[in-house]
Image (cartoon, rainbow, N blue to C red):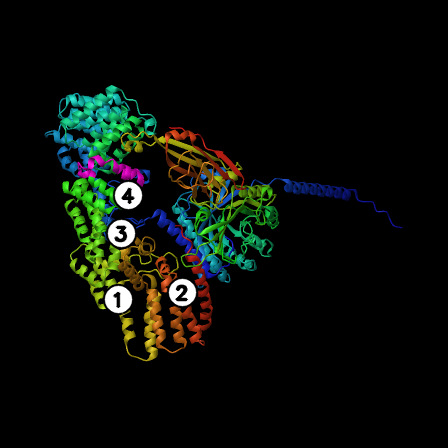
Amino acid sequence: MARLAYPDPEAMKRSVLALGVAALAAVGLGLWFAMSRSAPPPPPSIALWYWHTPFEIEEPQALLDAGVRDVFVRAATLSADDGHLILTRLQRYAASPDPLRVHAVVRLEPSVRTALDRPAEIAEKAAEAFGTARQAAQAAGVLLDGLQLDFDCPTSRLGDYVAVLERVRRALPDGTALSITALPAWVGAPSMRSLGRAVDFVCPQFYEGNVGTNLDDGRPIASPGKLAARMRAWDRLGVPFYAGLPSYGQAFLYDEKGALSGVYRGLDPASALRHPSFETEECYPVDEHGDAAVGERATGEQVVRLRAIRPTLGGQGVGYRLLYRLPTTASLRRQVEIARSTPARHLRGIAVFRYPEASETMTVPRESLLAVLRGEPTDLDVRLSAVVEEDKLARIEAPPGDTSEPVLVRLAVTNHGLAGSLVAADALVVTIRLGAPIPEFRSDFDSSEWIAEAGSRSSRMRATGARMVRASLAPGETARIGPLRIERRNLTEFRWRAVVRDWRGERHDIDGPELELR
Amino acid sequence: MTSMVRSSNFANRVGACALAALAAGCAAGCIFDWYPGVHFNSYEFDYGKAPRRWSMTSWGQRAVRPIDRSGWDRFPYERDWERLAAKEERRERDTTMARRLLIEAEFDTARPMVRKVLSHAGEDRWWLQDAIELLDATPAPATARMRDYVHALEAYRGGDLPAAMNAARRLAQGRDAVAPHALVLVGYIHSAKQRYEEAARTFASVLVRFPNSPRAEAAAIMVPRSLLRSDPDEEDGGRVTKVRAASIDESREAIAWLLKERPKSRFGWDAGLWLGRCEYVQGAFDAAAERYLSAYGAAGSQEQAERSVTSVRAAIRRMTDEQTRTFGVRLRKDAKLLALYIEYRLHYTSPDAEELRRVVAMSEGLRAEGSPRLLATLAQVAYDEEDYARALAWSESALAKDPRVADGLALYVHAACLAKLERPAEAERGFRRLVEQMPGSYLVLSARENIALICEADNRMGEALDQYMELGYGADCAYLIDAKMTLAELARYVRENEKSEHADVLSYSLAFRYLRMKEYRRAREHLAKLSDEVRHKLAGLDEPERYRIFVDAPFDTLYDPLQTVDDLERLDAAREREGSVSERFEAAFAYASYLYERRNLLFYNHALWQGLRTEAFGWYWNESTATERDTRAVRLHHSQHECLNRAGAEFALAAAIVTPGPEKARALYRAACAARRMADFNPYWRSIESSERKWEQAIELMRKVHALCPTSPLAPTAQKFEKVFEEEKREFDRWHSPPRVH
């Protein structure tokens, strides 16, 4: 008979204790896990890519106020020529952006792909570029905090790229952050995790997914509808990352058959719209697929398409198409909001390409960019103003007995807002009606026509008004008209109004103020 | 950032080049516009147009022609920076020394030193002038009061106004030469404390107590300056500053005293302007404008011109209806005043054609009276309107009355009209007369530009070069010396200028021209005239890689021309030697390879061009002055200068020596590569590609490599690159000529 075996009380005590500890540990672990899952991540910080020369940021405090903490500055370009790796386009540093963190970006041109079997050599050159950049920057009082490599490496060669990065890491001074830009296609690559381990963070570029080799199959620069899913996919890799978002525009040239011919670096869109060698085909806001869109479907991006109707000096080019894809504050805002609201544990921040040059027309201007980052509204705010003064010189020079009272009228249409108008041939139309013969005058508009009392086109001799058209009105921009030399008695009959279209293409009618002699 | 377009090496290169060109183009076009030149200029002038007498920096009016380069060396390499720095240092040291001597009361020693530094003393000038006036007015020996006064000045200069005031007040009590200086200083201190009424009273008291003191002039002009100041509201375009009637009277009185007692005072011009201010603050803007216009006519410096033009503009803007009519009537009666008004309108108000006609019509009643200044101005207006016959007639009428009128304006317009009417000899005489007889005229530099152009058109290149040297237009000098002058013309010029300060650079440049023409002996002769040190300096050998843009690019290196002469002479001689086909081929190949491997700067005259050559011909070439001879000279210069271009031709010659085989393939292959590079070498070569057809040459040569020498190891590569070149050519044709903005 089997003897009943009573448990040893001491052993029972130990077992109960052990079970209790284990249960507590499990509960604690569960709580910790649950809390860590539900704790809101810190707000993503902002980084800007700075791509032009020299490196100089005015009022860096304004950037800090908008949440910008890092600047990725193009520092040098590495290319391979006949097997030799050469460094070109070295950045010049003009001013210190302290207290922003600055990372030197070394761009590896596609030709470097041919040297991927020599990772040590590429790493050595990249480190040399960083050393050179660090010296040049320090001389201007700029401290470099990190190195970023910008390389459109073929996905199949990412393993080689890892070898390069591991060597670069070893060559960098301690404490220097190492990062890379990344193509969207890399997210599913087997080498991606090793790539992530080789660097401190990655900047996947959530834009330019499909440029298209034909005129009709191109896509917008950004696809806000896919942004959240793409971010989640990157987050799953477990690699800290900045979500790369675009604020720039691009222009492509297509041949007469509609095949992509290359990137166009000639005229800005407004100049092309007024250029006699082109006729406007289409200007419209686009949806995710690149089709014309209205309402919620519009991504904020805009397309301007022109056709060359005259040949170049070399005799070619008739029938070629110019296609501009232009960002707006609306397109940037939408992406930033999505990036900020998408839960992603490894999201470090948002990186915007790029910090605009002062004279750029195809990139969201600085003040508008910062307003979007601060979450402030960016509206089109067009106002009309006029100055009327006596034409003193005409009066001095009037022949004796002349009783005329000439005045000079100067009109101005100013965009006080942070959003630009639509870019289209007739984005801004100003109509002037005088009620008397209208004099010749100058203006900043692209084209003008004389009109009669009824508003129809008229000959110069019979004209009592004029209609002027302009292709865009950027934030802060003013389009001037005049001076118009008219008789003072005609001032009361003077009427003028502007019609401006916003990025959606919606019309805004604005009446000009009544004219009063100053 | 992304791989968005199909890429090839060429596309990458084109992209990089386009970006570089864009950046450089922006820099050149927006930041580095080039104006000091005739053949190279960002703006295409009609050089016959008379320039403005003064160029205002406000209202967007810039000094673009002519550019005064009188302070510049003709050739930058000649600038002795150390000497210039030493001179500047010496001046600063002398000024400090003068000041110290004055403070230490070493007046006898200080006197010559102060005189020496006075003209370039800058901010210290006012008090050094004060001190020298005091020293001149005081017989030796120096007194303690003089020393105290200098200390008071020093305190004022250092901003210690209480100390300065105490000392100045005490010193002003006396009756000696120091007292008026001290009294004026008291006035300055009141002004510094914005106590303008007290300041004016103090300055006025100087005229009563010390009318014979040299400081009385300064005191007199300081009375209106203290009383008629404009307040900030007026400066911003608001209402005119209110001034008491008594203050205006006191100001007029002080100005009247100055003009009567000191008619040659250095403040005479200011007095005229302040009289205008008296009218202005009273609301008599027509009378004020009249005074200001007269002041404009008498302006002797840029600052005076700007002050008077700004004042004219302000007065006209504030005129009432009645005043505009009165002013118009007044202008119609005074030819001299009308001439100044027309000049003001022409240069500072951007009038359109209708306005100009209106302005000219104002002179109808006065032309018969025949004021030479008015006629000269009308002639200028007519020239600008391209009515040369009328401009000639009016300028002749002006010259008949006064050949020197308006600083030579009539003479200038007359000569310019003659040039337009194809009477260059008479035109040149007119311009030369202006240069010789009125060397101080603002039109002298423009006259020289015209003389140079006339001489060039008459193939008198040496005389044209003399003018460019005088003007300091380095790029024009370089162009004539390095490209336009024939070898004979240049050799004669060098001979005639053996003693000139530019003899070194001339001899060096002639040597380069001989070198490019393969006249090695003569090249060596001229280089031998220079010491090693000078030759190295001219060749820029202290930093032979200064032109390298790409860190690892070996082709932008400067070489010693003497070594080049020796090398090329040797290689050329070997080529000429009799020998087997193989030997002759190797010699020809070696010669071509020497050019091919040294490339871009082997024949570059660094001393003349200083890095500007490519940009000068590519971006600043002034088509409006280019004649057929210029076009030919530029073409020839480029074909001789570019080693790669010459190497291509030499390789083709070498290839012709041998029958098809590996040697021929080597030579043809390099000839093809040279032609390929030249097709896209720089802006100038791109601009002539339609006639040079280097792309086609390159493709054809590559085709020959594999077609004629199919067994050569280079054949497969050539086959590949023939296609690459074809693709590149297509891209070049597509990219190179984007639509231009008209």
Q: Residues within 10 Å of mark 4 (few under 14, many from 20)?
A: some
Q: Which residue is mark 4?
A: B63
Tell me the CA gap for discs 2 and 3: 33 Å
* Cα distance in 3D space between marks 3 and 1: 27 Å
Tags 3 and 4 touching, CB below 8 Å: no
Name the residue nearer the viewer: B368 or A35: B368
Q: Is residue A173 visible?
A: no
Q: Would you say the residues marked 3 and 1 are in contact, meaning their CB atoms lie under 8 Å apart?
A: no
Q: Does residue B82 appear in this view? A: yes
Residue that sits furthest to the right in the current view: A1
Chain on which label 2 sits = B
Q: Counting residues from the N terminus, which is met first, the one under dot 3 or under dot 4?
A: 3
Chain under disc 3? B
Residue B257 screen position, x and y as percent: 16, 25
Instruction: Point out the tag, 2 or 4, that comes first from the N-terminus.
Output: 4
* Same subunit: marks 2 and 3: yes
Q: Amino acid at mark 3?
A: Val
What's the chain of the residue with tag 1?
A: B
Q: Is residue B542 above or below residue B294?
A: below
Q: Is B364 included in the stretch rendered in magenta?
A: yes
Task: Name the amino acid type tagged 4.
Answer: Ala
Q: CA distance from mark 4 to mark 1?
A: 41 Å
